[in-house]
């Protein structure tokens, strides 16, 4: 019987893919879960070097998960299906697997398809990150005070909800549970659309002779996330395209609404428009 | 004869309109131009209170400019024509006038129309500010290290270029000189379009049941400037509508381009799009 008071903590945690998030998981585990053994695999020599001394480094994903009871996939979302394929034959019997990806339907579908025990997979999406990626930027407190969504289906083993909750809670995150479908719809609006908007603005300005020497904080902030790594963002936007495409249409309509108010010199209409936008933004403070 | 080494500094500087920028001009003058006398007029009692003890406070704009040799208009851009009208009869013979507005064609046109000495007006646009406005937020170092555009026409008295340069340089700003037309076109792209974009995104999301509890820094940054005061921004966007409207059309096309790439699942096309956006953003760091 599992006591609700007992903290489930891994004996050996393996991280596959060591970028900002993977390195931060390793550093958070080192700080918050003293005694846990750490394994890691990464394609990149510089990423392996960034976590040397913290984790045992392995040459293949299959070797890295051997003996681990908790596996965190921290590669780009389009690499997760092949990672699942490459580890399922060497997973320990009691191992559970999660990820840190920004889309969740595809990784759950891959787990159901390629994984011998899809009920041992639970999705995780810590809402933390930075356009300044890379393992060197990883730090133990990246997840502190941030939301972490865990995604479950009717197949998810219930003990995994507690295991994943305990893991991310130990790293300081606030847990929110939802289905992969609900997750992908929600983050399309609050994460993927802002990314696409910032990129659309930056893309447009990149084709102009804009006077960047005059730019103040407004342009910098509005476009900040457009500096994010396209290797991560192309698969995210593609996997969530069904949600993102109608939102981009709405953005275009929202811009056209403002444009039409300006063309009509409708000061009261523009005022109401900006008041609504401001009230929304103030809810985020 | 005016020596180029001689610093032109006002004897008495009057600020008309005391918000974030007006209060910061007064505080910067107090810090950087010791000995200068300060006058101020503001409609708002709380703004007057914020600069009490720094400046002599007057009940009308006309009274505030009496005896001042340098006048800084720091009211919303649509209030500048009537401010010019209300002061021209009491201006000292040697007085020069500038402003801090975000659009420049309209104030120059107003100066030419209502002002007895339009050659004594020079436009200023310090590229500093914050969505957190108000006189209480004003501080002496707001302009430090920031660009300050001064706008001149063929009528502008040449000594004013030096006076304005010396004033803003004393406040730590980096001076860039251009015509009102060039200014308005340049800031449409690097300031007004980002403001409109952030507002379009915030306006769209304000109509949805967005899961703001999940939002990370990306949404906050991309929409930050949408929290700016609509009392300031409605006239700015209206006065620069001729430049902003085609830019908003381009933004809609930029979004549609990304949307079409997503619909075609064109990974290479999306990659090229995001690469261009990222390269642009990295030029701002």
Image (cartoon, coloured by chain):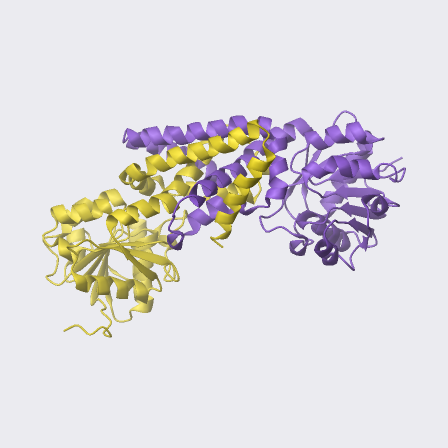
Chain colours: A yellow, B purple
Q: In this view, does A275 lie above or below A142?
A: above
Residue A5 percent across, percent down from the top left: 24, 75
| Image quadrant in which you'd find residue B89 | top right
Residue B66 visible to the viewer: yes
Residue A254 percent across, percent down from the top left: 45, 35
The front one of B173 and A98 is A98
Image point 36% across, 50% down: which residue?
A134
Residue B7 visible to the viewer: no
Seen as rendered, the residue at the extreme front is A268
Q: Is residue A251 above or below residue A190?
A: above
Left or right of A156 on screen, residue B18: right
The front one of A70 and A197 is A197
| Image quadrant in which you'd find residue B112 | top right
Left or right of A31 on screen, residue B32: right
Residue B254 percent across, percent down from the top left: 42, 29
Left or right of A7 on screen, residue B27: right
| Image quadrant in which you'd find residue B81 | top right
Residue A252 percent across, percent down from the top left: 43, 32
The front one of A52 and B243 is B243
Q: How many labels does the image show?
A: 0
Q: Quadrant of the N terminus of chain B?
A: top right
Q: Is residue A93 above or below residue A110?
A: below
Left or right of B123 on screen, residue A193: left
Q: In this view, does B24 lie above or below A32?
A: above
């Amino acid at each position: 019987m599992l006591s609700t008071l007992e903290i489930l903590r891994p004996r050996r945690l393996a991280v596959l893919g060591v970028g900002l998030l993977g390195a931060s998981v390793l550093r958070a585990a080192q700080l918050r879960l003293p005694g846990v053994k750490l394994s890691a695999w990464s394609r990149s020599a510089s990423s392996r070097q960034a976590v040397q001394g913290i984790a045992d480094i392995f040459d293949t994903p299959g070797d890295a998960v051997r003996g681990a009871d908790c596996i965190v996939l921290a590669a780009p979302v389009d690499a997760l299906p092949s990672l699942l394929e490459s580890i399922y034959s060497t997973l320990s019997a009691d191992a559970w697997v999660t990820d840190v990806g920004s889309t969740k339907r595809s990784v759950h579908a891959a787990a159901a398809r390629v994984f011998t025990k899809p009920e041992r997979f639970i999705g995780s999406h810590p809402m933390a990150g930075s356009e300044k990626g890379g393992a060197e930027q990883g730090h133990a407190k990246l997840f502190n005070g941030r939301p972490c969504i865990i995604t479950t289906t009717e197949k998810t083993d219930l003990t995994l909800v507690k295991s994943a909750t305990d893991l991310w809670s130990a790293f300081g995150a606030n847990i929110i549970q939802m289905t992969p479908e609900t997750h992908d719809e929600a983050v399309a609006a609050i994460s993927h659309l802002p990314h696409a908007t910032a990129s659309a603005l930056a893309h447009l300005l990149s084709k102009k002779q804009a006077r960047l020497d005059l730019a103040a904080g407004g342009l910098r902030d509005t476009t900040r996330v457009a500096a994010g790594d396209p290797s991560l963002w192309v698969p995210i936007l593609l996997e969530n395209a069904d949600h993102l495409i109608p939102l981009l249409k709405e953005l275009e309509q929202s811009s056209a609404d403002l444009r039409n108010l300006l063309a009509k010199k409708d000061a009261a209409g523009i005022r109401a428009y900006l008041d609504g936008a401001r009230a929304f933004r103030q809810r985020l403070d």
